[in-house]
Image (cartoon, rainbow, N blue to C red):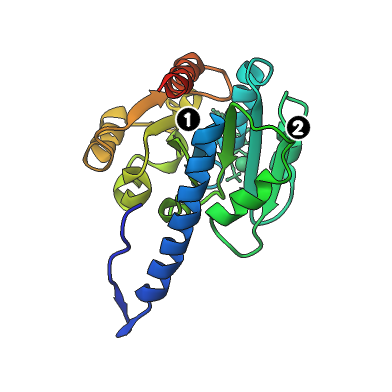
Amino acid sequence: VDAVPDIAIDGRRTIAVQKSLLEKNAAVAARLRARFRDAGVFVVNVLSSPGAGKTELLGRLLDEFGRRWRCGVIVGDLATDHDAQRLRGRGAPIVQLTTGHLCHLEASMIETALGHLPAGEADLLLIENVGNLVCPSGYDLGESLRVVVASVTEGEDKPLKYPVMYRTADLVLINKIDLAAAVGYDRARADASLDPVAPNAARFEVSARTGAGLDRWHDFLEAKVRASRES
Ligand SMILES: Nc1nc2c(ncn2[C@@H]2O[C@H](COP(=O)(O)OP(=O)(O)OP(=O)(O)O)[C@@H](O)[C@H]2O)c(=O)[nH]1
Ligand SMILES: [Mg+2]
């Protein structure tokens, strides 16, 4: 997790509190990471702006893996259980976290949510974070893989405008590629925005709607899960 830079707003400095919150979160995340490692659980934290397609992509993933792997899903939203309802019946238990005013998930919430998943750990735990390109980036959830979903309808410059989020990504899924022509998506400009902030993150173009590109993403994930089991 990146250290939060010291920022003066109207001459006041509030960052010390943020730092201590992040330190507390990091300690819980470290505990979670050890627990997941001991239990052999591979954990994916999925982040994006609202509506980029996190739930749709997770639904597709469950359709592929839900009956082959023991999956569990934790979804976070400010309000409603809409995402949990969409994901139910696809081969995995779902826990919906509603955060009220909080714009991100924290490691302690994941610890609590684990108590609501069936006994015996999963092979693959999927976490859908609250839709937000800013707040969730600083909060480690003990994950093995951090996936940022960028949809083509958001504008190609978003990685440059929200660099902290993209800097933490292990993988960027460029979703809604079926709409690329309709919105005049400029691939070269998108790459030029991603290159400075996420040079080492894998990038796949996908469409959760049509299924285009999903095989590559699913194969990538399967290889990661298998590699983590062998290590
Ligand atoms: N055309 C198209 N629409 C998509 C695609 N993926 C998702 N959508 C649509 O985009 C809308 C938002 O998708 P969600 O899966 O709810 O997005 P989300 O990131 O989970 O949204 P929040 O949880 O609210 O942050 C829905 O109407 C989806 O059907 C895609 O690949 N192509
Ligand atoms: Mg969602």
- Element at badge 2? loop
Depth check, mark 1 against mark 2: the one in front is 2
Residue 16, image x, y percentages:
36, 75
Residue 230 circle label: none
Which class describes the residues within 10 Å of circle 1: few (<14), some (14-19), or many (20+)? many
Residue drawn at (45%, 54%) of the image: 139
Q: CA distance from mark 1 to mark 2?
A: 22 Å
Residue drawn at (24%, 35%) of the image: 199
Q: Is mark 1 within 8 Å of ligand 1?
A: yes
Under mark 2, the amino acid is Arg
- Report if residue 135 is visible in the image: no
Residue 88 circle label: 2
Whichever of labels 1 and 2 marks the residue nearer the N terminus, that label is: 2
Judged left or right of residue 148, residue 43 is right
Residue 175 circle label: 1
Under mark 1, the amino acid is Asn
